[in-house]
Amino acid sequence: MKAVAVNPARRKVGVVDHPAPALRADAEVRFRMLEVGICGTDREICSFAYGWPPAGFEHMVLGHEGLGVVLEAGAGVADLRPGDLVVPTVRRPCPHAHCAPCRAGRPDFCVTGDFVERGINRVHGFMTEEVVEDRAFLVKVPPALRDIAVLLEPLSVAEKGLEQYWNVQNRFGFGAPAPPNPRDKKCVVLGAGPIGILGAMAFKAEGFDVVCYSRSRKPNHKAELVESFGVPYVSSEEVSPRGLAEQLGRIDVVYEGVGHGHIAYDVMEHLGLNGVVILTGIPPDHDKTHLVKTDRLMRRMVLNNQIVLGTVNAGRNAFENGLRHMEQFIARWPEAVRQIITGRVDLRHAPDLLLGRPRGIKEVLTVSADS
């Protein structure tokens, strides 16, 4: 079957012939890929910055943002039938018995580093016609979410951020485990790409007072999209981080979705009491430096009980929470959430998209039709 793959040894990216999968265990599911999203991670792998093929292969099939339709299920799978929609998670647990997170079903917190990731690290991804996967790593998707479900993986980034935010805030030891009253919490989302926009939707759906802080001046399409679901858009070219803090009065949480450290640190200087910064981006490792006033930042963090946390990948629970929010998005902001996907392109043209400059907000590869 056809697949889009990277060959690091030959420094090639293209469409290849790839072995068709078959069920080998009762807990496995075979599904046909419908759509695969393209993100910055895919483009970085195609620049050969990282990405390791599975054992026995020169190439690795790309893609970790997938949506598929079930073709057959093993005898041990009781809740999936042909025709059901599924989204696969990305990270697979390490084999070590002493890794408590992996053994508890949370490989996103693996402590050994021996995990693998679909389309990223030592296991093939989803830019191909068919895939076989263990039922444990598949999330069943309601048919009503068919046209946006490919966004579930990037949304899971925000869902994990929200989960960790409430875990951090519940350290106080008073109040219920559930979010106490998010409506008096002010969230600044950095960036208006897919991660930022989906993060803004998730935080707003949870009741936060959300502002999107991004570079480009208005008017622009991203600003119009963000403001269409009630989130003000502020350009960093027009308003400084200090000016933003003065406008808001207090910043309780910063959700970084832009991938540039200096922006996060500039806003972090104006974080409020008990504030949390959630970092999701992975900036390129280069020699350029941005001066950070470390002593001043450290002083503020200590005196204000602030926390900075990094979050990578997401567990199954974050995908399931994402489905709950997606149903809210479709009910409340149907046009806005659909507009995040700005282009659908046939799988054959994937190399052009992977090696070229991003176009629009989220580009999606169409692998096959539903029928």
Image (tube, helix red, strand yellow):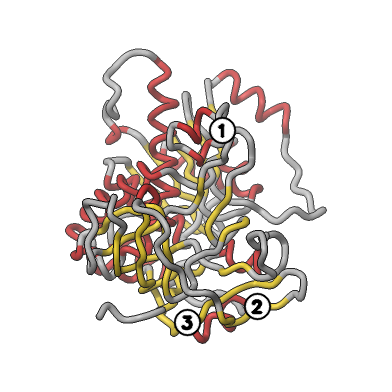
The quarter of the picture where residue 224 lies is: bottom left
The quarter of the picture where residue 14 lies is: bottom right
> Where is mark 2, residue-wise?
13
Closer to viewer: mark 2 or mark 1:
2
> Where is mark 3, residue-wise?
347
- Point 52% across, 85% down: residue: 349
Residue 114, can we see it?
yes
- Point 66% across, 67% down: residue: 57
Query: Of the residues under marks 3 and 1, which one precedes in the sequence?
Result: 1
* Element at label 1: strand
Q: Are marks 3 and 1 in contact (CB under 8 Å)?
A: no
Find residue 40 and report its horizontal and vertical position in percent: 57, 64
Question: What's the CA distance linking mark 3 and mark 2?
Answer: 13 Å
* Element at label 3: helix
Find residue 60 and report its horizontal and vertical position in percent: 61, 67
> Where is mark 1, residue-wise?
308
Identity, as a three-letter code, of the amino acid under mark 3: Leu
Find residue 304 and report its horizontal and vertical position in percent: 53, 21
**Residue 217 or 192: which is nearer the viewer?**
192
For label 3, the crowd category at 10 Å Cα-Cα, with few meaning under 14, some 14 to 19 and many 20 or more, is: many
**Residue 215 or 285: which is nearer the viewer?**
285
Find residue 178 and report its horizontal and vertical position in percent: 27, 27
Identity, as a three-letter code, of the amino acid under mark 2: Val
Q: Are marks 3 and 2 in contact (CB under 8 Å)?
A: no
Quadrant (top left, top right, bottom left, bottom right) of the C terminus: bottom left
Query: Of the residues under marks 3 and 2, which one precedes in the sequence?
Result: 2
Q: Point out the residue furthest to the right here.
A: 287
Question: What's the CA distance linking mark 2 and mark 1?
Answer: 37 Å
Identity, as a three-letter code, of the amino acid under mark 1: Val
Q: Give left or right: position of 344 versus 267.
A: left
